[in-house]
Amino acid sequence: MPKILRALVRGFWALDRYAGGNQPPTRLQRFVARHPLVLAVAIGLLFLALVAAPPGTQTVDVEVGIVFGALLGLTYYLTAIYERARQRRLIRQGLWEPTSPSANPAEQ
């Protein structure tokens, strides 16, 4: 990896730490990291439904809904991928130990 790219990556993670990125993920963040595509499709379809559902919707409204729904879904997908990388970094650095999804705290 070139030195400039390595410095950019280190700078990105330093900014992440400054913004609270060393905190353990919440339950919602763990779900999003496990299912990034589900979140992206759900957000995109929700936006499309909000744009295309009102009465008197034109064809151009549906087209705009599809385009912006896809862009919004892509944005959420990339955010979820970032969260997945952040959680991997926390595990690698020993700052957080994930529990299995089937582990019930009452049984332990």
Image (cartoon, rainbow, N blue to C red):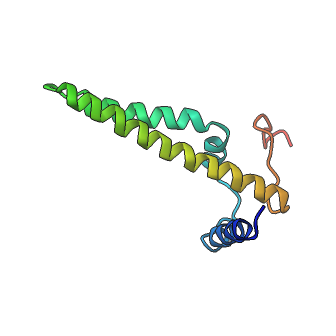
**Up/down of 99 relative to 4, above or below:** above
Residue furthest out toward the front: 2
Residue 67 in the image: state x and y as whole percent: 35, 36
Looking at this view, is 100 or 105 the one in front?
A: 100
Residue 40 in the image: state x and y as whole percent: 51, 37
Q: Residue at x 68, y 48 (%)?
A: 84
Q: Quadrant of the N terminus?
A: bottom right
Looking at this view, is 70 or 5 the one in front?
A: 5
**Up/down of 55 relative to 39, above or below:** above
90 with respect to 41 (left or right): right
Residue 11 in the image: state x and y as whole percent: 67, 72
Q: Residue at x 59, y 46 (%)?
A: 80
98 with respect to 58 (left or right): right
Looking at this view, is 62 or 86 the one in front?
A: 62
Quadrant of residue 10 within the rendered picture = bottom right
Q: Residue at x 75, y 37 (%)?
A: 101
Q: Quadrant of the C terminus?
A: top right
**Up/down of 2 relative to 33, above or below:** below
